[in-house]
Image: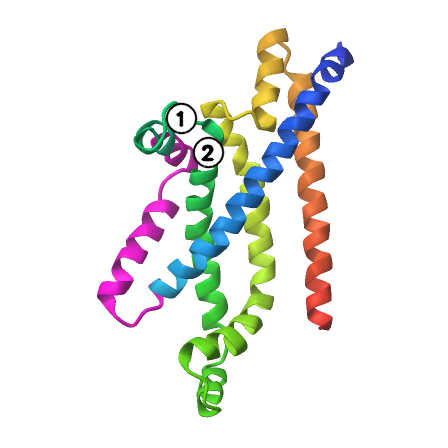
Amino acid sequence: MDFQFNIIQEYLPFFFKGALLTIGLSLIGVIMGLILGLLIGLGKMSKNKWVRFPFTVYINCIRGTPLLVQILIIHFGIMPLFMSPVNPIASAIVALSLNSSAYVSEIFRAGIQSIDRGQMEAARSLGMNHVQAMRHIILPQAFKRMIPPLGNEFIVLLKDSSLASIIAAPELMYWGQAAQGEYYRVWEPYICVAIIYLVLTLSLTYLLNYIERKLEKS
């Protein structure tokens, strides 16, 4: 196989910029997903079925449809209502955040429900209200159990951010497609892109394992 390193050499700065944007998109998506996911997860745990209903519908709709379809609907259908011209990076952030929030909300719900009910009763018997008990007793314990699934969600989102290339967001996959389109070569750009994704996901995996071990000792 005639492997042309000059293609990788030429596109390496673009791959680096794309990798930074990929990390940024994933990081913002996870942070927004954590914030929205906590609110949605608590909403779904409400004892009132009318309060619980919209959150359940939201989670089912997001989890039951492909992220690619969500990106296209948000970019071509929803974002034009708020900005013109539409920024593909903004569309990608909104789509990844909304998608992540549905999965994170279920992680929060499972984590909170995994804590023994006696913990809440003990906190209430000490004079705490429900919010104080959740903040000081339940959530800190639940969060330790959420670290592995949240880490998996971050890794999945990092890889899924490659779908943003469909709306021309200049992340890592976008530049791989650009190199492939210019030189009509498949191996060089896509192997390089795959290696960068592999380095990112493995680095993130080791970092999350380190944080998990630290939290177990604390």
Q: Contact, CB < 8 Å: mark 1 with mark 2?
A: yes
Describe residue 77's horizontal placement relative to residue 17 as left or right: left
Residue under the point 69% across and 32% down: 196
Magenta includes 54? yes
Q: Secondary structure at mark 2?
A: helix
Q: Residue at image x 48%, y 38%? A: 93
Q: Quadrant of residue 106?
A: bottom left
What residue is shown with label 1? 86
Main SS of residues in magenta? helix
Asked if residue 204 lies in the magenta stretch, the reply is no
Please tell me whether mark 1 sits on a helix, a strand or a loop.
loop
Toward the bottom, the furthest residue is: 125
Determine which residue is flagged by label 2. Answer: 90
Nearest to the observer: residue 191 or residue 131: 131
Instruction: Give the amino acid at mark 2.
Output: Ala
Q: Is residue 188 above or below residue 109?
A: above
- Spatial CA distance of label 1 from label 2 is 8 Å
Nearer to us in this view, 18 or 206: 18
The x and y percentages for residue 165 are: 51, 25
Camera-nearest residue between 152 and 18 = 18
Question: Up-down: is 162 above or below 214?
Answer: above
| Kind of residue at badge 1 | Val
- Magenta part of the protein: which range? 44-73
Residue occupying the point 33% across, 33% down = 82
